[in-house]
Amino acid sequence: MARILAVGIATLDIINGVEHYPHEDEEMRAVSQRLCRGGNATNSLTVLSQLGHECHWAGVLADEPDARHIETDLEQHNINTGAVLRLAQGKVPTSYITHNLGSGSRTIVHYRDLPEYPFEQFKQIDLSDYDWLHFEGRNIEETTKMLAWAKQYAPTLPRSIEIEKQRHGIDALFGLAHVLLFSRAFAQGRGHADALSFLNQLPDNSIHTKRVCAWGEAGAWAMDDQAEYHSPAFAPAKIIDTLGAGDTFNAGMIDAMLRDLDLAAALEQACRLAGQKCGYEGLDFVKGYN
Ligand code: ADP
Ligand code: FRU
């Protein structure tokens, strides 16, 4: 069991299950609706907690009813909120998700109003309490400072970062973490049709890091300074829900690296875990996993 701190967001996800993806200007009924806590960092923590780790979240909450929904879920998953910044005003990040029950795909419209977690707050955290630090690649200016601070004051504490979306200046983060977890969308946005061509062209300042790129139903690829690796995806009997597959994959990577698995084995474990998740609705699927 390791102590893991993740910095990022928690969202309220409003998920409408639909029989087909709507056309523009269509009016249709959802066949199901689910409200749950989401957000990449907290999703990964939810899975890591089920894998037996002690999980802590550093993020922002507003004092409003939907925040209580989020906190209840975090409590139920034993995720510590001691490092959370609580604001009197504002609305928690809300994601409107159309879940196509036919294909399992998820289409997301985000509403974001709350300020991001600030470096000044992060500085107050005692990093000696943790075995692993995980970040989301957002809030670039502040995240750069947090990573640089951790690098200076806790140099041996492993730092992973998820690079999911293109954001101005995001490349500055690449040299500051030990593990870079890229999304397919990010690689494609940079003009690459496959993961390896993307990973291979990363700049020299990321050369000593483990570089990983998940690629949906094609599995995932990784590189370190020794070699390149690939794991296929492990599809469940039926795809039920792919929301949070990437966050689950990241949790699988972190768990495997904390247990000193090599990069090839870590990649396979993460793909198996994420594949298992795709066969379940939501993120409470880990029971029985080993
Ligand atoms: P995101 O949730 O960020 O869109 P991806 O689609 O890249 O993430 O998926 C992350 C991982 O989840 C993949 O590497 C794969 O292992 C697993 N996965 C995703 N979709 C499927 C699928 N249809 N079948 C099996 N595994 C999948
Ligand atoms: C899934 C997810 C959702 C959330 C959105 C945030 O990966 O974390 O739970 O609404 O992405 O970007």
Image: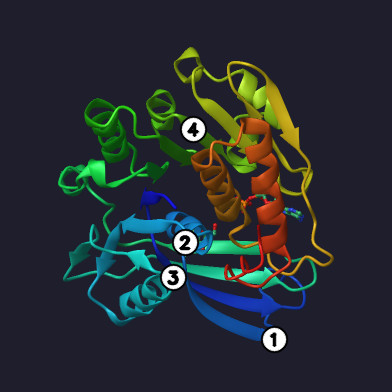
Which residue lies under the disc numbered 4?
Answer: 179
Asked if the residues shown at circle 2 and circle 3 are in contact, with their CB atoms under 8 angstroms apart, the answer is yes
Decide if residue 167 is in sight here: no
> Which amino acid, by three-letter code, is at mark 2?
Ser
Side of 137 where 81 appears, left or right: left
Front: mark 1 or 2: 2
Q: Residue at x 34, y 29 (%)?
A: 156
Q: Nearer the viewer, residue 102 or 129?
A: 129
Side of 15 where 69 appears, left or right: left
Which residue lies under the disc numbered 2?
Answer: 49
Asked if the residues shown at circle 1 and circle 2 are in contact, with their CB atoms under 8 angstroms apart, the answer is no
Assess mark 4: CB under 8 A from ligand 1? no
Please, which colouring scheme is shown? Answer: rainbow
Q: Residue at x 18, y 49 (%)?
A: 121
Cα separation, mark 4 vs mark 1, equals 40 Å
The percent coordinates of residue 67 (x first, y second) are 32, 75
The percent coordinates of residue 105 (x first, y second) are 71, 63
Q: Residue at x 66, y 70 (%)?
A: 99
Cα separation, mark 4 vs mark 2, equals 20 Å
Which residue lies under the disc numbered 3?
Answer: 77
Side of 135 where 213 appears, left or right: right
Which residue lies under the disc numbered 1?
Answer: 31
Mark 1 vs mark 2: which is more N-terminal?
1
